[in-house]
Amino acid sequence: MAGRLLARRLFGWLLQALLGLGGILVVATGGLLLWLQSSGGNAWLLAQLLKVAQPDHGSLSVTDLETDLFSSFLLKNLELRDESGKRLVGVEAVEAHYQFGSLPALMVVDRLDIRGVSGDLSWDPDQGVDVARLWELPPDDGSEEPLDRKSTRLNSSHTVISYAVF
């Protein structure tokens, strides 16, 4: 009888501890998600994104990220520069509205809005377009025809993609 009573008490304490730990975990996760949606959290996310996306030869900069994590993000003032500092591509804003789907589509983009695209790209027959040289890519196998143009300038005030599945 005493053994059963002790086992019940021990089980009750263990259950309370696990429920308490679970509650702490839920509150901490909720707090983290709320913080990530704040301006401080958005700044931290942007810093992490820029660390991962930096080219091997050149720089990528974005001045601001606004996101609610679950349905939209806005990136402002994107610039891609080569090693000498020449601005290759600039974008005023990229805004995406999305939803998470089930497999095989992990994310469905309902709307991708790209505003103020400009660029000054050069083509070298041996090395390709200069923006592609910023990241180290596998060697070209020669299966694609090279472009005839020596330089390409981009300018688009507004581009919208209304539906995509990734």
Image (spheres, rainbow, N blue to C red):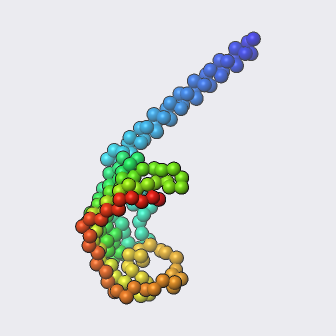
In this figure, what is the number of numbered marks?
Answer: 0
- Measured as percent of width and height from the top left, residue 128 is found at 42, 82
Q: Is residue 71 visible?
A: yes
From this viewpoint, which residue is outermost toward the front? 163
- Measured as percent of width and height from the top left, residue 95 is found at 32, 57
User: Which residue shows up at 26% across the image and 73% down it?
Assistant: 155
- Measured as percent of width and height from the top left, residue 24 is found at 49, 32
Is 128 positioned to the left or the right of 7 in the image?
A: left
In front of the other: 33 or 50: 33
Specify the quadrant that holds the N terminus.
top right
User: Which residue shows up at 51% across the image and 50% down it?
Assistant: 102
As drawn, 6 above or below 156: above
User: Which residue shows up at 50% across the image and 55% down it?
Assistant: 105
As drawn, 55 above or below 106: below
In front of the other: 83 or 104: 104
As drawn, 131 above or below 71: below
Q: Quadrant of residue 15?
A: top right
Q: Quadrant of residue 79?
A: bottom left
In front of the other: 150 or 137: 150
- Measured as percent of width and height from the top left, residue 53 is found at 42, 63
From this viewpoint, which residue is outermost toward the top? 1
